[in-house]
Amino acid sequence: MNTPGTVFQEAIRNFLAPIEHLLNDESVTEVMINGPNEIWVEIAGKIQKTTAAFKDEDSLRAAVNNIAQSVGRVINDDQPRLDARLPNGYRIHAVLPPCSRKGTTVAIRKFASQQISFKEYVRMGAISLDAAQFLDIAVKLGKNILVSGGTGSGKTTLLGMLCERIPPGQRLIVIEDASELKVEYEHVVFFETRMADEKNLSEVSVRDLLKSSLRLRPDRIVVGEVRGAEALELVQAMNTGHKGCMGTVHANSSEDALTRLEALAQGAEQKLSERALRGQIVSAIDIVVQISRYSDGSRRIAEISEVRGFTPDGSYDVVPIYSMSRLLKRPDGKLAGSLQPTGELPTFLAEIEDNQIPFGRDKFQKPSAA
């Protein structure tokens, strides 16, 4: 009997042969197919064109159809889009012509088989040692954390690292659209959404799973990506005793992350006044971590901020505790800079001191100007 994994491996050998070497290349993190004769890859954060090509549009279309069948999905003229997680953990999205004018368009995103550690993250230059220790403390103290960034900026990787810093002895429930998070934790439950299909299986959304998780005695809830009305349930969970919840959202700044969360929550069936909703958001979110992909291909934390309510003009008051210094281009094209304290003290500094955590006030002191 063929399993989904063996069927997918056969699909690679039989239909994806033109890109099999790219999928097997560990340095390649994403393969992008813009029609049969135009294939790009991402390596070290940089996109570059390859010489790989499919024989013609029919062979590419056959490959996509075969992959869809191997994961129990359908892609055809009536349903020209495919969004699925492959048995090996890769994420695939495909769009068929005429919606895709160049021909069948496919993106296959690969994910690391092992979660990197904060120590490696510091060594990579993605975060400073002090900032990493500050996030570690925030997780241990049960602060609710929102990771914000653009597509491919590394939000999922960072979220996985934060999950692994949760103190032992807790029950963690992870909810994702497609399972991508690598979390090594003693007591963890993984939930994954399900799309409706032609076999009359009903959709199970992130919102549905979030509602279920609240009845399953979670200590902490992690939502891989907040992108719908489930934002309201997550905010309300954070406000009803579930400390240390985490999630990611697509946004270009820390302030935009809260505005985005607000807009998503407004789509919920349960309607709150704008004032009540915004009040719940600032009560729920303690820390916003903004992560960015820079022009040299590097992914780094750009800012770690604390949510403190509202400014006099009614905007969200999001105060940077650590922010990226000025970035200067080196001769090799890499950007030189680091995450530095802004001089702002977190409002929970007394909690850090009361728990006798060795992280003094000097860790927040702004560097003197050169």
Image (cartoon, grey):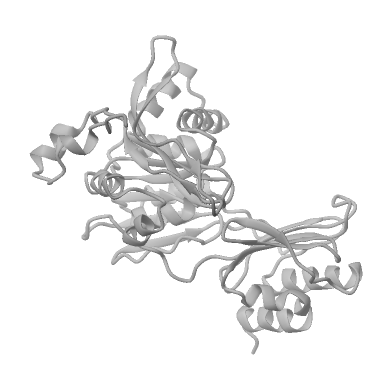
Nearest the eye: 171 or 130 = 130
Q: Residue at x 32, y 34 (%)?
A: 286
Query: Viewed as shown, does residue 189 lie left or right of 39?
Result: left
Q: Residue at x 73, y 79 (%)?
A: 11
Image position, residue 5 (x, y; %): 61, 80
Nearest the eye: 55 or 223 = 55
Q: Residue at x 35, y 55 (%)?
A: 122
Image: 54 above or below 350 = below
Q: Quadrant of residue 84?
A: bottom right
Query: Viewed as shown, does residue 305 lie left or right of 348?
Result: right
Q: Quadrant of residue 198?
A: bottom right
Q: Residue at x 16, y 43 (%)?
A: 359
Image: 67 above or below 123 = below
Q: Pick the quarter of the image with the C terminus.
A: top left
Q: Quadrant of residue 94?
A: bottom right
Query: Viewed as shown, does residue 84 lie left or right of 15?
Result: left
Q: Pick the quarter of the image with the N terminus.
A: bottom right
Furthest toward the bottom, the residue is 1
Image position, residue 245 (x, y; %): 35, 45
Nearest the eye: 148 or 194 = 148
Nearest the eye: 233 or 51 = 51
Image: 129 above or below 19 = above
Image position, residue 18 (x, y; %): 78, 76
Image position, residue 351 (x, y; %): 15, 36
Query: Viewed as shown, does residue 118 lie left or right of 203?
Result: left
Total count of labels: 0
Image: 339 above or below 55 = above
